[in-house]
Amino acid sequence: MNRLLLLCLVALAPLVTLAQDGAAQKLPGAPFSKAEAGDWSVYSLQLRVGNDFQAEPLLDGIERWDVVSVASGTVTMKKADRYGSRVLRDQTNTVSLAASGPTLAEFLEKDEASVKDAAWSDEKRTIAGRELACRKAVIKKGDDKNGVETIVVFSDAVRAPGLVKLRVVETRSGKMSCTDLDLVGTGTREQTLLAARADLWKLPFNPATDATVGDWSAYRVRRGDQTATFAWTVRAAEGDRVTFDADRERHLDRAWTPSLPDCLPGLEGKVSEVEERDDTKEVGGRAFACRRLALHLEPKRGPAARVTLWMSRDVKGLKLVALEIDGERKARWELAGFGTKDGALWGKKAAELEDPSGK
């Protein structure tokens, strides 16, 4: 068990560059050359023992890569492995952007000779409903009784390190173990480029960016025949940390756009069929210039649904204009008012809305 875990961590410790022909093989698309601080990629990390690579994993976790800084031709990345609440590795790597760049051998922590026979091919892979053009390398060492097969897949569509998949299959005396690293999301500080999970999909923009103490937005929420009111109010703002009073106290960072579940309770699970575009949404007789985000959500609990939301930079507080959940269970959020500590700029505060009981 400890040896297999060590194999998992060692095999996944690297940073990358691909080769076509010759000695130092460079990464396809040179992902580190376009890296920016705040770029991130998240992977599922699974370890299986035995010949059935579809079986339940012995270990099932997440690996996250974050670009901490880019300066003087060097990219600094932080990488963390987590299994549930356990952090098995939390380390920082630096990658030089010299002319040679990091190589495939450096990424896999191998010598150049061990990867010179890598077999390269083009392929397409679909992540969260988006098809990616990829470049794959297969490296085989040893035989069926004792050997290691390494598969690495890269895409220009993925932020540094550009990795889509890494699989390491080790065979010792005929007994096999398989470690898989599979992309589940990638993006920048401001936005998600693709993600298979709602907790990785960022809102169209950050409600905390220009938040001021006392800013608020109020909503009418309808679920079936039930109606309620709901408000987001900025209670404190210290540096980049902004505290909102909502369904509970929520802390957002001005420098980091939050994900859907960070702001909207219950919107957690797998996502696909994501669409984001500019739109206009009319609420209460006013047309708001919005950014519209729509996606198919398979929640951790309950039936699947189509979720559509509209956000506007003209709105204070949460900046949400409307939210629609369509499926077996339907819900509607609609902006009823927003303003500052000095009063309403449009509409009404939650306390001023009609009592949903009709009294």
Image (cartoon, rainbow, N blue to C red):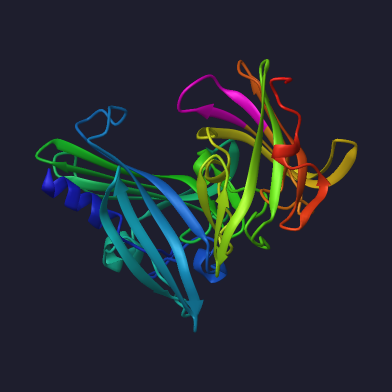
Residue 183 on the magenta span: no
Name the residue located 42 percent from the left edge and 66 percent from the top edge: 25
Q: Quadrant of the C terminus?
A: top right
Quarter-of-image position of residue 263:
top right
- Figure check: 358 above or below 292: above
- How many numbered marks are there? 0
Q: Position of residue 125 (x, y in %)?
A: 52, 40
The residue lying furthest to the front in this view is 359
Residue 220 lies left or right of residue 15; in this view the side is: right
Name the residue located 16 percent from the left edge and 46 percent from the top edge: 4
- Figure check: 198 above or below 209: above
Name the residue located 63 percent from the left edge and 19 percent from the top edge: 327
Residue 176 lies left or right of residue 45; in this view the side is: left
Front residue of 341 and 128: 341
Front residue of 74 and 238: 238
Q: Position of residue 102 (x, y in %)?
A: 41, 70
Q: Quadrant of the N terminus?
A: top left
Q: Which residues are magenta?
A: 296-307
Q: Position of residue 61 (x, y in %)?
A: 32, 43
